[in-house]
Image: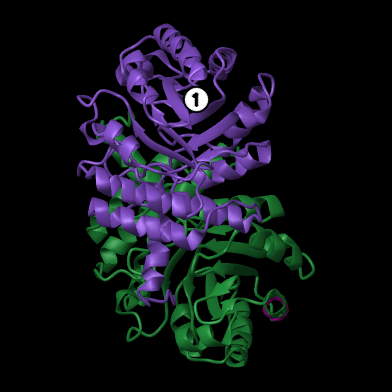
Chain colours: A purple, B green
């Protein structure tokens, strides 16, 4: 939601989150405790967390950039905090104005704080395959960074194809290397559908043994620097693929379509998710007959 | 192009076809000899074929619905005619107003005519996975129809997921059955990206041993009955996937982007292909930095 220009009310955000919970999703990233100056859309993080009363089996998380953000997150009942950094120096600098070393220090400071408070830590590592500034990313350095993050005690590590440039072979190759660090249930894959590869990459990730995949409702997200480009992998597309592969999830696809529809209504725009488009067209009794 | 409302001039169509040939594509479906009453966009099929002078290593084809259409195709130098029918009675009736039996008779009449004239025959079988009227399609009846079409002498049989409802497991299962009919190089897969599954299904098709995949530039196509729904699998997305899997093609991806750009200019609209969108955004120096 951080990329959406239309600022939603806290109530509307809560409405969407309740709908997602109702669809059977068990892990929801609620908001971000970055400075409101950076992302005005998420300035209401504290109020939103206070307002929500979700069932206890739902794992809730929010982004935490630093100790100041952690102080805000601490007073919520979020079960997880999400820390983040990039796999390349340039992207890390442009995105969060830190060197990789500085980011590692911040995360090293946040992990024990969260653990003491009984919160889990998820780490996002961005641009693990390809960087818009440095090109194809050296996998050895990615493995090294992942190793450091796991050693710091993060519970889950999400590997981000931030600009949607990964391909199935790149996924297979990277996950193969992750096995040398820890068991694969520590890792998640985070695909953007910028070049339409997200589901093909998901197939590769599944084949390689990954069981956790990030997605966003309707494919919300996108990138402010690439107008027209698709955003995150759409949750509906992901769930439709998983169902078709006889992989069980807790998620009800029909209810998920309702969430997508709600997200479109709230944002006042069409989202890029394809399964959502197809389902809504069909609901309108426009049978795709060609 | 049959679904595009803006009628292109014959010259513009030729321009796009030359650009496709220049990108290294070796199989191009040029037009259709259906009645201009049905599809005014393709009323210039005869003039377009006469106008084109493509290198001899490019296989050109056009749709031929009946003997009258064949008479028109006959006087061209197209190397292939494409016949078509659906795997379900209802879709065949709604789409081409014939029973399946009648369609088989027409194809039985056309194949020897084409062979006598030294032309190859490609057959399209639509809705082989799911039909908008009859739901999930019985694979036994699909296998039976494919068998009949192969026995009639068609050189290649393209299996169409016309409404984009196939899933990887459905693809694996159907192709497994095709092995009982003929060698797999007789079969092509024709995916629509309506629910975003086209590339995941392509991965399954490749895994199953299929080497021919239909696609359209920029994902042009779509379906007049499902506004907003994506069309055919975009050629750029397909080629990007194939390249990433180290599968060699004759196609230059950069030149393909030029074709997509040209198609958008000619049609005066944005096409749904994702790799195209991402590439054009990048060309505009809008580095995707998120």
Measuring 62% from the left and 39% from the top, which residue is drawn there?
A211
Q: List the single residue furthest toward the right.
A: B180
Q: Which residues are magenta?
A: B145-151
SS class, disc 1? loop
| Chain ID at mark 1 | A
Measuring 30% from the left and 14% from the top, which residue is drawn there?
A97
Q: Is residue B30 magenta-colored?
A: no
* Front one among A152 and B174: A152
Residue B25 in view (yes/no): no
The residue indicated by pointer 1 is A119
Left or right: where does residue B92 sit relative to residue A266? right
Left or right: where does residue B261 sit relative to residue B89? left
* Front one among A115 and A276: A115
Q: Percent position (x, y) of residue B187?
A: 65, 64
Residue B146 lies in quadrant: bottom right
Image height check: is B210 above or below B187?
above
Mark 1 neighbour density, 10 Å: few (under 14) some (14–19) many (20 or more)? some
Left or right: where does residue A185 sit relative to residue B79? right
Q: Percent position (x, y) of residue A18?
A: 39, 50
Measuring 75% from the left and 67% from the top, which residue is drawn there?
B177
Q: Is residue B146 magenta-colored?
A: yes
Measuring 31% from the left and 63% from the top, which residue is drawn there?
B13
Image height check: is B46 above or below B253?
below
Q: Quadrant of the C terminus of chain A?
A: bottom left
Q: Percent position (x, y) of residue A20?
A: 42, 50
Q: Main secondary structure of the magenta part?
A: helix
Q: Quadrant of the N terminus of chain A?
A: top left
Left or right: where does residue A71 sit relative to residue A191? left
Residue A71 in view (yes/no): yes
Q: Percent position (x, y) of residue B45?
A: 37, 75
* Front one among B72 and B93: B93
Image height check: is B100 above or below A200?
below
């Amino acid at each position: 939601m951080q990329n959406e220009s239309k600022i939603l009310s806290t109530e509307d955000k809560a409405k969407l989150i309740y709908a997602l919970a109702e669809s059977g999703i068990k892990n929801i990233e609620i908001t971000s405790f970055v400075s409101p100056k950076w992302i005005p859309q998420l300035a209401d993080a504290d109020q939103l967390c206070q307002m929500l009363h979700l069932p206890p089996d739902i794992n809730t998380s929010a982004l935490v950039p630093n100790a100041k953000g952690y102080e805000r997150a601490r007073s919520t009942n979020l079960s997880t905090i999400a820390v983040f950094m990039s796999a390349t120096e340039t992207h890390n600098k442009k995105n969060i104005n830190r060197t990789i070393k500085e980011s590692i220090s911040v995360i090293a400071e946040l992990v024990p704080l969260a653990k003491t408070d009984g919160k889990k830590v998820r780490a996002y590592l961005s641009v693990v395959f390809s960087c818009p500034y440095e090109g194809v990313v050296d996998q050895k350095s990615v493995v090294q960074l992942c190793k450091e993050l796991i050693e710091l005690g993060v519970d889950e590590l999400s590997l981000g194809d931030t600009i949607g440039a990964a391909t199935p072979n790149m996924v297979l190759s990277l996950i193969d290397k992750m096995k040398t660090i820890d068991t694969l249930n520590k890792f998640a894959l985070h695909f953007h559908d910028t070049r339409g590869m997200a589901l093909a990459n998901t197939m590769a990730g599944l084949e390689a043994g990954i069981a956790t995949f990030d997605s966003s409702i309707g494919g919300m997200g996108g990138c402010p620097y690439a107008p027209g480009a698709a955003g995150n992998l759409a949750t509906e597309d992901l769930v439709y693929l998983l169902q078709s592969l006889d992989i069980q999830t807790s998620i009800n696809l029909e209810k998920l379509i309702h969430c997508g529809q709600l997200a479109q209504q709230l944002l006042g725009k069409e989202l890029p998710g394809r399964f959502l488009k197809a389902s809504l067209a069909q609901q309108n009794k426009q049978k795709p007959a060609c």
